[in-house]
Amino acid sequence: MLTDIDYRKLEHRWEGFDWYYKFTTQNADSTADLVCENHVANELDFTDQSKVALAFWFGAMGSPSSSIFAHKFGNFNSDSFPSIMNFFEENKGRISFASDAKYRKIHFKQFIESVCNSLGNKSIYDFTIEQLWKVVGKPSDMAYDHYKSLHINCLENWWQWGRMGQWCFSEALNTYTLFKILPDKMEFGPEGKSHTAGWVLANEKRWLDSRHTEINEKAICEFEDWADSYINRTHFTHTLDVNYYTLETACCNYKRQHKGSRYAGCYIDELYDDLQTLKEDWPEYDFLYSKFMEARKRTLPSGLLYENSKDFDSRKPAYQKSWHNAFKDYGRIPRVEAWANNQTQRWCDITELGYEENLGEFWS
């Protein structure tokens, strides 16, 4: 991977994105939380029922707090509502939610109440299985039909669940359980503004505003076709984590690289910091912290772990916020470049990376 070209420029956009997607899928970066949480669940002998509950909580929270709730409440049902709410109210200040799910914390009672009401006399496991069994008889399309059936029933019944919650729930089920649950497209368009913008930018197109007023149905169909072709082509190069789930995450990240609010390869770093918060805020769940840290060593590349690096300082976070400007200001992708060129990874301020000021705006 070249380090003397500007990956913001239209003619280099796709090359940079393609390198990034290869990096994030071959190193489990975009799925680091899922891979580690699944390892922890296996180490703690979670049952199949508890793993479905874990997938639900991951969709709802997107943080290590999902493991706490799954461990405490297991295969919950409608009768669990009072105890879930009591636990939430007693621990609200230390229960973490991912940035995309913070509104669910604000309205947690309405959300959990709607979920428990939809379960009727079933558990979360039985409810999920019921949705999946509705599509038995279509083996060739079963993974897609599983996704659609869950998508429809959860979005209709769960308060403010949203496309993102369902997407994360489905991806977690696909990771933690033996069920194959896959979307059959990227879901580009107004309901997926962030990853749509990322795909547009990666494909050497000009920036579109957040309302996507320039994207019509024909364009969306073209985007879906391009993404499907790319997924199929990439499978010939490598097969790990190549699917719509990881491509969607990569597109969201890539868009935010352009805006200066993310950097490529940030998710393994972010998980480390989330786990330090878990350790500090939940001393009674120190065993979970230990299992997660062990999972990092066992499931993620050693060279991408902050705790293994020469830059490690337990007083400092792994997440490198100054790297938000690496792409926006310099057209560089530091974590990916180091991996592609077999160089030692760094955890340092961007000023230590030696990038020269690159004048001019490339938001074209």
Image (cartoon, helix red, strand yellow):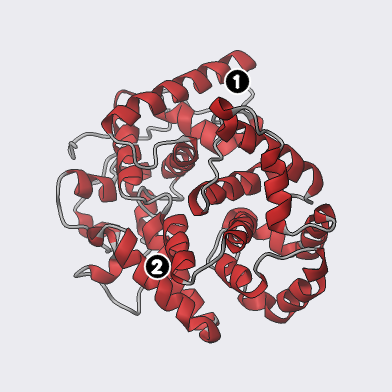
Horizontal and vertical percent position of residue 65: 57, 69
Q: Which residue is mark 1?
A: 214
Q: Nearer the viewer, residue 218 or 206?
A: 218
Q: What residue do we see at 65% from left, 68% from top?
A: 74
Q: Which residue is mark 2?
A: 272
Q: Is residue 321 left or right of residue 15?
A: right
Of the image marks 1 and 2, the number of the one nearer the N terminus:
1
The N terminus: image quadrant: top left
Horizontal and vertical percent position of residue 96: 59, 68
Please determine whether, in this image, residue 343 is positioned above or below residue 221.
Answer: below
Label of residue 252 in the image: none
Q: What residue do we see at 59% from left, 56% from top?
A: 55
Q: Amino acid at mark 2?
A: Tyr
Q: Closer to the observer: label 1 or label 2? A: 2
The C terminus: image quadrant: top left
Q: Is residue 157 left or right of residue 40?
A: right
User: SS for tag 1?
Assistant: loop
Q: Amino acid at mark 1?
A: Glu
Please determine whether, in this image, residue 241 is positioned above or below residue 205.
Answer: below
